[in-house]
Amino acid sequence: MWADLKPIGRNATSNGYRRYAWSGADKDCRTWFRAQAESRGLTYEVDRNGNQWAWQGDPQAGDAVVTGSHLDSVPDGGAFDGPLGVVSSFAALDELRRRGAEFTKPLAITNFGDEEGARFGLACVGSRLAAGQLTPEKAHELRDADGISLPQAMEAAGYDHSAIGPDPERLSRIGAFIELHVEQGRALDLTDHPVGIASAIWPHGRWRFDFHGEANHAGTTRLEDRRDPMLTYAETVIAARREAQLTGALATFGKVSVEPNGVNAIPSLVRGWLDSRAADQVTLDQVIAAIEQAAKAEAARAGIDLRITRESFTPVVEFEHALRDELARILSRDIPVLGTGAGHDAGILSASVPTAMLFVRNPTGISHSPAEYAAEDDCVAGVIALADVLEGLACT
Ligand code: GLV
Ligand code: MN
Ligand code: MN
């Protein structure tokens, strides 16, 4: 499976993956998913929001055990964030068949669409739509950098977008959702365990800062006559780091766009995207308020018109204790239980469905980077753990 996925959407220069939702690379990943489903005799379907499903047993029977993750990536992402969960799901099913496990419940493997939000700015679009946490109206407003709307992108990829929206009937047929994911920090590495269970996902969100200044000539405009939005943006980046440090939160400006983006012109507009996360809501509110205040003060001083828009927000997710405890019982009681600052479809679904996550050790902690890595032995340990969990939940 890894050999098939390896070349899809891989950039030859960076060695990172660029598998953006509804792009050609995403389509190739989806074709791969379908082929994996069909080669195992699973019933393949696409739901109204473009999420892919592969069923063993009757999809209508209810109380299904579902596992899976996503195949899309951030710009220059690593090989494991997302695909490890999908590959491990198919491998765990293979392992259960090898064991001769007798299933008493339907089992499904999923690939949720547009988890990273790299193209349209909002993460977990497929699961948010299904869970009713993103309205079809708002989804229709989503645009990529070229102005292509989400429905247009789905249509161009050959997917029906006419019925995107909440899917309570489908979610009501799920008894448990388990997402396996590569860990995106070093907590497991520090505990010396290959696999862990998630306790909670930190609250997190994305804010767009639009700094409007005045375009002018870089060679003739006196410094004191400039209204340069780049400077205010730069001050805001520094303030974000300072405030994050003071509050114990995380704050990152990882994406920026500049207009007109000319070497010899003072920009008219600098648009920066802030990603911020914290262990609790109060801290997150605090850091965002402090960054906004600092940005506004700088903007006022420099004659910059600043507009701040919250583009997405996900509150804290505490995974259901009963299911967490069940996983710990199946896998052995001393398995590490850890929180994460990374967002996941599991976090979205947890409001509608009993949900749990397994993490696989990441020895460097690096993620959202081509350097993301997990050792083969640990990936195999993840598959075995997932198979044990699925067997415990779905078999006699
Ligand atoms: C998804 O990986 C996120 O946490 O941004
Ligand atoms: Mn990710
Ligand atoms: Mn992920």
Image (tube, rainbow, N blue to C red):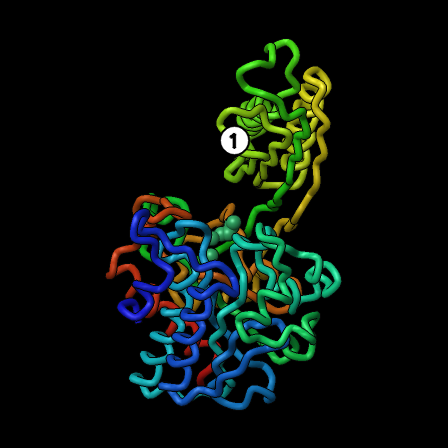
Q: State the SS at label 1.
A: loop
- Percent position of residue 182, x then y: 39, 56
Q: Residue at x 67, y 71 (%)?
A: 164
Horizontal relation, residue 375 to residue 50: left or right: left
- Percent position of residue 392, x then y: 44, 76
The image quadrant that residue 288 belongs to is: top right
Horizontal relation, residue 279 to residue 374: left or right: right
- Percent position of residue 30, x then y: 45, 72
Question: From this viewpoint, which residue is outermost toward the right?
Answer: 137
Q: Quadrant of the C terminus?
A: bottom left
Can residue 349 be seen in the rendering of this structure? Answer: no
Task: Reply above or below: 147 against 104.
Answer: above
**Disc 1 designates what residue?**
262
Q: 10 Å neighbourhood of mark 1: few (<14), some, or many (≥20)? A: few
Q: Residue at x 30, y 53 (%)?
A: 12
Q: Residue at x 75, y 62 (%)?
A: 137
Q: Residue at x 52, y 55 (%)?
A: 116
Q: Amino acid at mark 1?
A: Gly
Q: Quadrant of the N terminus?
A: bottom left
Can residue 75 be seen in the rendering of this structure? Answer: yes
- Percent position of residue 73, x then y: 45, 56
The image quadrant that residue 10 belongs to is: bottom left
Q: How many marks?
A: 1
- Label 1 beta carbon less than 8 Å to ligand 1: no
